[in-house]
Image (tube, rainbow, N blue to C red):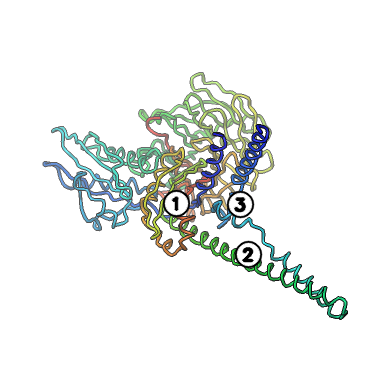
Amino acid sequence: MKRFFLILILIISNNIFSILEIEIIKGSDNLSKIAFVPFAVNEGLELSQGENLAKLIESNMLLFGEFENLDKAEMLAFPSLEEDFFYRDWKIQGVDFSVIGKINSVNILGNLNISYTLFNINRRIKVLEGEIIGSENNIDGIAKIISNRIYEKITGLKGIFDTKLAYVINSDSDTYQMCISDIDGKNERILFTSKSPIMSPDWSPDRKKIAYVSFENGIAEIFIQDLKTGERDSIQALGMTNSAPVWSPNGKSLALVVSFSGNPDIFLYSIASKSLSRLTNHYAIDTEPSWSPDSKKIIFTSDRSGSPQLYEINTSSKRQKRLTRDGTYNARGRYFPDGKSIFFVHGNNGNFQIATKKLSSRFIQTLTSTSLDESPTISPNGNVIIYATKKGSKGYLGGITLNGKSRFSLPVKNGSVREPAWSPLVNK
Amino acid sequence: MNKIITSFHTLLLLIIFFSLIFSIFSMPKLKVSKNESIKINFYEMSELSKPSRKIVSNKKVTSIKKNKDSKDSKDSKDSKDSYTNSNNLSDLLNNSFLKKDIKNEISKIRLTKERKNIIKFSSIIQNKISSIWIKPNSLSETLSAKVLIRLAPSGEILDFELEEPSSNKSFNESILTAMSKIFFFEEIAGADRKVFETNFRNFKLVFKSSGEIR
């Protein structure tokens, strides 16, 4: 009899709890609004130091157009401590998050103790609280660390404000410069200048070296340059031409293109043993290799089907697979940091745009709306793509967030900028 | 006696089992827009599933009228009684069918109106939430989270609960933030009491991310 009651209860509860469900799939196109309140300062420090620090954090957070800010002039209060913070002051301004903080001097050496707090205004909760001790001379670095922590708390993604960018500047017709800078364009450093073309820079996973191709000796030659010492080593005489070097995720080898007797194929080069092993062997052109994050596969471009398409090869089994079929031009493929999707240059009716594709799907999505886009590189957190594009004859770097909400261009340089390569995270 | 009780129990068990199966599978999805859907609750489904006899009854009425016409044209004295009988019968049938028709029609209109109201208010809720929900960036996985909402008849949100969170912390946070931005669905105040009680007193929002790159 108990069984009947149990089943009866089940039926009744099933009917009682059949509740209306409304699906929400589309989100808002609005951006989260953040108020960066000028930091308060302890006695003995300049007020402008607090203001400067808040401004640096603000400009970091706004760098990729993912947030909007509340102007200082519109702020109703300038709290620096939690007890002085009132959610209503920010709620009526439509603010989603507020950052407050205070700078205390620690010692006469100029070390600062900086405390900061992040509030979620809508939920009326403190979501982050932290302290950092750093030198007065490194206020930019401190701002980047705080920005990373705030960014991570709001988005759930790793902060990328202390990453760097490598790129090639072609300042006049016969001057090429291999450069690196902070991701915001500051602290630019020229690594190498040549009268011959420089191409394909790629960061070592520890961020200590860069591999690139230089034509300084009349042929395509791969160099590895140490960023600290500036020393350059050539990967010598592997074949007729060597190009497109890409570091493996463990930093022990490079995938590269070697052309013996004019037919480029993909090879692996062991840095320790300086030995070469062949990956592809096809009469067509195989080029532009790039590693999957788990090191098991390499994506590359090949024209073996009659037009440039993307393929991947398993580095152990050497099994190959074609990845793209739509359109007559799909090249320069790279994996997303999660390894589940790829991004590449997709050509269609003379327009070359950056596109993405999930490996599990056959459809591609075009990201950019400019027409001569090339050399895409992705942020280590997988959220932003920077690519080279052209306005007239001048090349510049454009960027886009993966959700498509934000498009931006990086500060204009004195010359055409090409071949961007985003560095890995510091702690990788 | 024991056998009778056992077979009665078995029969009851079977009825309950089929009723359970029916109730589980009778939860159709009603498309509101291309990508969005609303589940209609069991109450409404059971009302809708009642068969309408309008077409059948009309046919019968028509055939009875034809019979009557043919009998009139023949004008047979012998058949007068039978004609009177059949006339009474057809009137009786007519009345009973018409009553059922009217009842069905009223029920259908009422349900259509209810359905339209559910869709209307659900769309309002959908649009309001969509306009304030800032999805986290770069969601490459398929995610889903359910929020249970309790409303007052005025449309005020009495409370909400992230009943079934997703595996992604940022996704869950974004939902809680969106839900914290809204206090009222004012339009619900205009809803019919029965529609409100059966559908919007307690309802769920199912937040979804398809895992597309953009």
Asked if residue B64 is positioned above or below residue B21 in the image, the reply reads below
Q: Gap between marks 3 and 1, in whole Å?
A: 50 Å
Give the residue at the far left of this rendering.
A43
Q: Gap between marks 1 and 2, in whole Å?
A: 29 Å
- Chain at numbered mark 2: B
Of B190 and A196, which appears nearest the observer? B190
Q: Quadrant of residue B86?
A: bottom right
Q: Quadrant of residue A229?
A: top left
Of B94 and A250, which appears nearest the observer? B94
Report if the CB atoms under discs 3 and 1 are less than 8 Å apart: no
Q: Residue B203 location, x and y as percent?
A: 46, 51
| Residue tagged 1 | B202
Does mark 1 fall on the same chain as mark 3?
Answer: no
Mark 1 vs mark 2: which is more N-terminal? 2
- Report whether B165 appears left or right of A362: left
- For disc 2, the neighbor class at 10 Å (few under 14, some 14 to 19, many from 20) is some
Q: Residue A238 location, x and y as percent?
A: 56, 26
- Report whether A234 appears left or right of B59: left
Label number found at residue A403: none
Q: Amino acid at mark 2?
A: Asn
3 or 1: mark nearer the eye:
1
Report if the CB atoms under discs 1 and 2 are less than 8 Å apart: no
Q: Amino acid at mark 1?
A: Asn
Q: Residue A302 location, x and y as percent?
A: 63, 38
- For disc 3, the neighbor class at 10 Å (few under 14, some 14 to 19, many from 20) is some
Label number found at residue B104: 2
Image quarter hosting the C terminus of chain A: top left
